[in-house]
Image (spheres, rainbow, N blue to C red):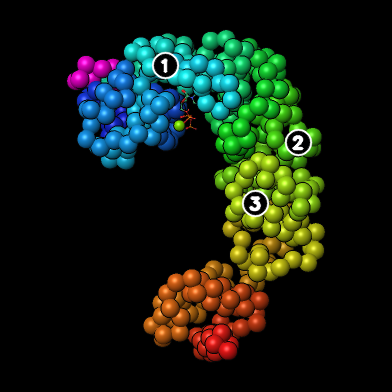
């Protein structure tokens, strides 16, 4: 197969392949970018693989960074954004289940493609757009199949994370999982217990955001994968989440987690524990543990803090849409939004520039604090949203500060 019109992302990177080839090395575009181009999907990172060893790569370009040189990866900055160039390599097994114990650089493309996880990820493309397809990745792409390169059991034993990746590619690309690959998944799912949480989280979040997340979660339950994920998530009843994700898709990982936790039956303390087990960021833990209960309160018309609704209105709305809440709840939230005295921070009658010009507040962290105070007071209808009222109030704050 030859691609005649390359997407711009590849054209931009072509000079790098040319430089490597002119120096007598082989160089190819590899991995996700080639797969996504053939599927007509947006291309993320263009990765390059080469027969040149890292020191040889470095000698051919002006600006490089050793991003992962012990694993063979050098970042080349000579042409625009920066491209990761990785030397063809083979990998040993993963004793600590994080990284291969040892990588060995090789000069042969086949060896490099053989160590990749799935046939659809083991395609390479040369400078002229010719596709190298040594493991029938093209036919799997055409038929929509996630299939391990080689013996699935061996590949999942080398690196158990590949099982999570099988589910996430199936969710993202709307692909089926090949029968042998799926049988290996059922057999080796317990190995996921040994994988670093951070690696699992990356794949799980991509799965949750996939257009076919619902099916992948069902496969994950059926094949026993979910049972080995962190935080005992395998014991949860995911039926409502699966149902919601059948017709809707989470746009961000944060929305996906909030959605999950809304349906978790965990109290806030347990929610925070769960998110710590998953090693989520402090910010995600804060936002999620605040919004998940808020969603319940809105659904049940229970008391809630109006300013929280204002502050998190965008994400709150996304979660409610994902959940397909009742018309009544949707009506309730729409009315709350419509009745807010301001619908966004920019609607305040004064802004930071006004306060600096009038010498009321200096630029810096204090500005954010003052604006938040008046924003909250306006949202709660404690202050009228006019310049005079707000400025008088801020002057009062300032004199209070001085005492
Ligand atoms: P995405 O678009 O989500 O980035 P991707 O296919 O580029 O998808 P990456 O995780 O960026 O996925 O990995 C790049 C390539 O490296 C993959 O296409 C695959 O060939 C290889 N790869 C990544 N992780 C593994 C793994 N655990 N085992 C084997 N090969 C892997
Ligand atoms: Mg990638």
Residue corresponding to mark 2:
232
Q: Can see residue 136?
A: yes
Closest to the observer, 218 or 109:
109
Residue pictured at 71% horizontal, 68% vertical: 305
Q: Is residue 26 magenta?
A: yes
Residue corresponding to mark 1:
104
Residue span colored magenta: 21-28
The answer to which quarter of the image holds residue 21 is top left
Residue pictured at 29% horizontal, 32% vertical: 13
Looking at the image, is mark 1 or mark 2 earlier in the sequence?
Answer: 1
Quarter of the image that includes the N terminus? top left
Horizontally, is 79 left or right of 313 in the view?
left
Horizontally, is 134 left or right of 343 in the view?
left
Residue pictured at 35% horizontal, 11% vertical: 108
Percent x, y of residue 178: 60, 15
Quick check: 403 above or below 285?
below
Looking at the image, is mark 3 or mark 1 earlier in the sequence?
Answer: 1
Q: Which mark is residue 285?
A: 3
Quarter of the image that includes the C terminus? bottom right
């Amino acid at each position: 197969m030859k691609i005649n019109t390359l997407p711009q992302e590849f054209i931009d990177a072509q000079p790098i392949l040319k430089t490597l080839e002119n120096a007598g090395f082989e160089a190819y575009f590899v991995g996700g970018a080639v797969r996504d181009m053939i599927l007509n999907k947006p291309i993320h990172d263009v990765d390059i693989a080469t027969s040149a060893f890292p020191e040889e790569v470095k000698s051919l370009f002006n600006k490089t960074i050793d991003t992962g040189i012990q694993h063979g990866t050098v970042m080349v900055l000579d042409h625009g954004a920066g491209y990761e160039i990785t030397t063809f390599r083979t990998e040993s097994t993963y004793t600590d289940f994080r990284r291969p114990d040892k990588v060995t650089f090789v000069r042969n493309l086949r060896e490099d493609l053989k160590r990749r996880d799935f046939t659809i990820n083991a395609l390479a493309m040369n400078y002229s757009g010719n596709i190298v397809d040594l493991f029938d990745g093209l036919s799997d792409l055409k038929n929509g199949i996630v299939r391990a390169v080689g013996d699935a059991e061996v590949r999942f034993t080398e690196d158990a994370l590949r099982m999570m990746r099988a589910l996430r590619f199936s969710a993202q690309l709307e692909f089926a999982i090949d029968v042998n690959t799926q049988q290996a998944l059922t057999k080796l799912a317990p190995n996921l217990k040994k994988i670093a949480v951070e690696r699992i989280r990356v794949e799980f979040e991509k799965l949750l955001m996939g257009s076919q997340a619902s099916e992948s979660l069902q496969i994950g339950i059926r094949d026993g994968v979910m049972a080995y994920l962190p935080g005992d998530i395998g014991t949860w009843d995911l039926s409502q989440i699966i149902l919601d994700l059948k017709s809707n898709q989470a746009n961000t990982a944060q929305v996906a987690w909030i959605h999950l936790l809304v349906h978790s039956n965990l109290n806030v303390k347990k929610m925070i524990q769960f998110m710590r087990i998953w090693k989520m960021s402090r910010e995600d833990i804060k936002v999620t543990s605040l919004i998940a209960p808020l969603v319940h309160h809105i659904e049940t018309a229970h008391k809630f803090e109006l300013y929280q609704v204002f502050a998190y209105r965008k994400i709150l709305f996304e979660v409610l849409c994902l959940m397909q809440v009742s018309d009544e709840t949707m009506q309730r939230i729409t009315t709350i939004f419509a009745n807010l005295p301001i619908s966004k921070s920019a609607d305040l009658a004064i802004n930071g520039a006004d306060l600096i010009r009038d010498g009321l507040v200096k630029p810096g962290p204090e500005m954010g604090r003052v604006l938040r105070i008046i924003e909250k007071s306006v949202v709660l209808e404690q202050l009228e949203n006019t310049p005079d009222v707000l400025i008088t109030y801020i002057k009062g704050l300032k004199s209070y500060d001085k005492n």
